[in-house]
Image (tube, grey):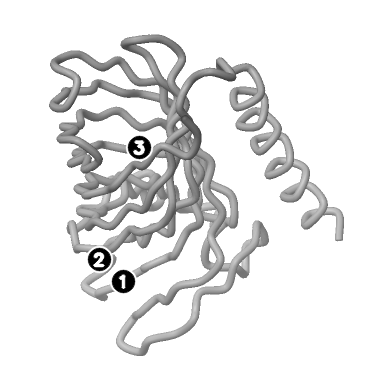
């Protein structure tokens, strides 16, 4: 119960930060919201018993809702709630393994935009917070991931890291390429370290909520 309470407290704190930026935005600005679909080229940085393990880069998916709060003519704050599949394939002692966790991710990106009104380029960067809620692993047999911080579990629930990327906006459509790296070891094993790393490519839409 203490572990679950700690996770909820982290989620609440991150949500309060997002709400803070919403409340501080100019009331006359146009809050935008929309949907996002895309693919992930996902891998992990893996160290096992002090040795770096080569990891493959399989494909995953991402989708969800996002929103944008203009802060000025060229600056904005972006966030959302994104389903994101991550993981990798790797081998240890000639045994093949796969791990494919599913995360609910909340990004918090600061954006700089330039270009014309209807066609603009954007550079963005910011932290993300993610919570794993499922997935599978494989070592010849597919099994459901067990989540938690104990040694007997497969993956820690909480991950956080940093995103950076570039986006092209044409009217209400946004094409985005981003790179995200975890800042937390998500392996509960004492002899293994696993860090999420993802290149994401997505297409999203943003519509004004208020005028």
**Real-space Cα separation, disc 3 to disc 1, in angstroms:** 19 Å
Q: Residues within 10 Å of mark 2 (few under 14, many from 20)?
A: some
Q: Is residue 73 above or below residue 191?
A: above
Give left or right: position of 135 versus 23: left
The mark nearer the N terminus, 2 or 3, is 2
**Real-space Cα separation, disc 2 to disc 1, in angstroms:** 4 Å
> In the drawing, what numbered circle is on residue 181?
3
Q: Residues within 10 Å of mark 3 (few under 14, many from 20)?
A: many
The mark nearer the N terminus, 2 or 1, is 2
**Real-space Cα separation, disc 2 to disc 3, in angstroms:** 17 Å
- Total labels: the figure holds 3
The answer to whether the residues at label 2 and label 1 have Cβ atoms under 8 Å apart is: yes
Near-viewer residue (49 or 77) = 77
Residue at x 23% of width, y 23% of height? 122
Residue at x 46% of width, y 30% of height? 211
Of all residues shown, which one is farthest toward the right?
Answer: 1
Give left or right: position of 56 versus 66: left
Of all residues shown, which one is farthest toward the bottom?
Answer: 141
Q: Secondary structure at mark 2?
A: strand
Q: Is residue 85 above or below residue 19?
A: below
Q: Secondary structure at mark 3?
A: strand
Residue to which mark 1 is pinned: 98
Residue at x 65% of width, y 35% of height? 14
The mark nearer the N terminus, 3 or 1, is 1
Q: x%, y% of residue 59?
A: 20, 63
Q: Residues within 10 Å of mark 1 (few under 14, many from 20)?
A: many
Q: x%, y% of residue 38?
A: 24, 56
Residue to which mark 2 is pinned: 89
Quadrant, the N terminus: bottom right
Give left or right: position of 114 versus 147: left
Q: x%, y% of residue 131?
A: 56, 54
């Amino acid at each position: 119960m203490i572990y679950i309470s700690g996770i909820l407290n982290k989620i609440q704190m991150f949500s309060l930060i997002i709400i803070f930026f919403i409340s501080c935005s100019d009331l006359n600005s146009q809050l935008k919201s929309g949907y996002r679909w895309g693919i992930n080229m996902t891998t992990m940085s893996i160290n096992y018993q002090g040795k770096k393990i080569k990891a493959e880069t399989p494909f995953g998916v991402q989708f969800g809702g996002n929103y944008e709060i203009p802060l000025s003519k060229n600056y904005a704050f972006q966030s959302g709630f994104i389903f994101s599949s991550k993981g990798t394939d790797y081998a240890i002692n000639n045994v093949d393994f796969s791990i494919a966790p599913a995360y609910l991710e909340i990004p918090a990106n600061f954006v700089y935009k330039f270009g014309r009104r209807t066609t603009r380029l954007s550079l963005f960067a910011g932290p993300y917070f993610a919570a794993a809620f499922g997935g599978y692993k494989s070592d010849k047999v597919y099994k459901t991931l067990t989540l938690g911080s104990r040694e007997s579990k497969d993956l820690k629930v909480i991950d956080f890291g940093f995103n950076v990327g570039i986006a092209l906006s044409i009217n209400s459509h946004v094409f985005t390429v981003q790179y995200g790296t975890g800042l937390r070891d998500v392996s509960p094993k004492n002899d293994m370290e696993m860090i999420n790393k993802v290149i994401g490519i997505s297409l999203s839409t943003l519509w004004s909520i208020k005028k």
